[in-house]
Image (cartoon, rainbow, N blue to C red):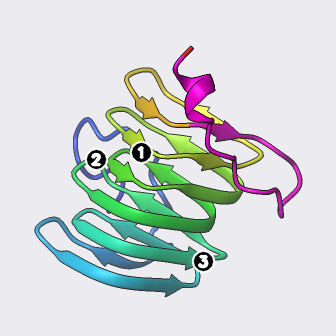
Amino acid sequence: MMGDKKGSTLPPSPPGDVKAILGRGSEFEGKLRFEGTVRIDGKFRGEIISDGTLIVGENATLEGEVNVDSAMIAGEIRGNIRAKTRIELHAPAKIYGDLITPTLIIQEGVTFDGHCQMSKDKQAARPQPVPQAAAAK
């Protein structure tokens, strides 16, 4: 599954570790709740909530809010990502949104356009938008 594809930047996972896959060419819209690990290689729009691990493959596009324990991302996400333990951004990931996590790893070749808040406090408040007057300076 992971690591099968030549040139994949995501580290391999043990066999049987991934509980569900939204494969390449698939599309889903709605709210996704899961346990364990889920991999998305298709298109997803909506909200993802889990105490597990989300893997977003390099061909995936995701639009919406993500709230998970950890995330490994190589695809494109438009929305905010909150992870309780860590976020890993692997090339060629493109992130357009805010990140909240105590541990952040960004590989060379990643595009990240947003704000980042790194806090050990799992209940940290979401980053506040920059006032337009301050943003114009």
Mark 1 falls on what kind of element? loop
Q: Nearer the viewer, residue 127 or 134?
A: 134
The residue drawn where x is 83% and y is 45% is: 119
Please name the amino acid that badge 2 sits on: Glu
Q: Quadrant of the C terminus?
A: top right
Q: Which of disc 2 and disc 3 is earlier in sequence?
A: 3
Q: Main secondary structure of the magenta part?
A: loop
The residue drawn where x is 87% and y is 49% is: 120
Q: Quadrant of the N terminus?
A: bottom left
Q: Is residue 47 left or right of residue 81?
A: left
Q: Nearer the viewer, mark 2 or mark 1?
A: 2
Q: Nearer the viewer, residue 52 or 127?
A: 127
Mark 3 falls on what kind of element? strand
The residue wearing badge 1 is 10
Q: Are marks 2 and 1 in contact (CB under 8 Å)?
A: yes
Q: Is residue 65 left or right of residue 124?
A: left
Residue 135 in magenta stretch: yes
Q: List the single residue furthest toward the right.
A: 121
Please name the amino acid that badge 3 sits on: Ser
Q: How many marks?
A: 3
Residue 75 seen: yes
Cα separation, mark 2 vs mark 1, equals 9 Å
The residue drawn where x is 23% and y is 48% is: 5
Please give the range of residues in magenta.
115-136
Label placed on residue 58: 2
The residue wearing badge 3 is 50
Q: Are marks 1 and 3 in contact (CB under 8 Å)?
A: no
Residue 71 in magenta stretch: no
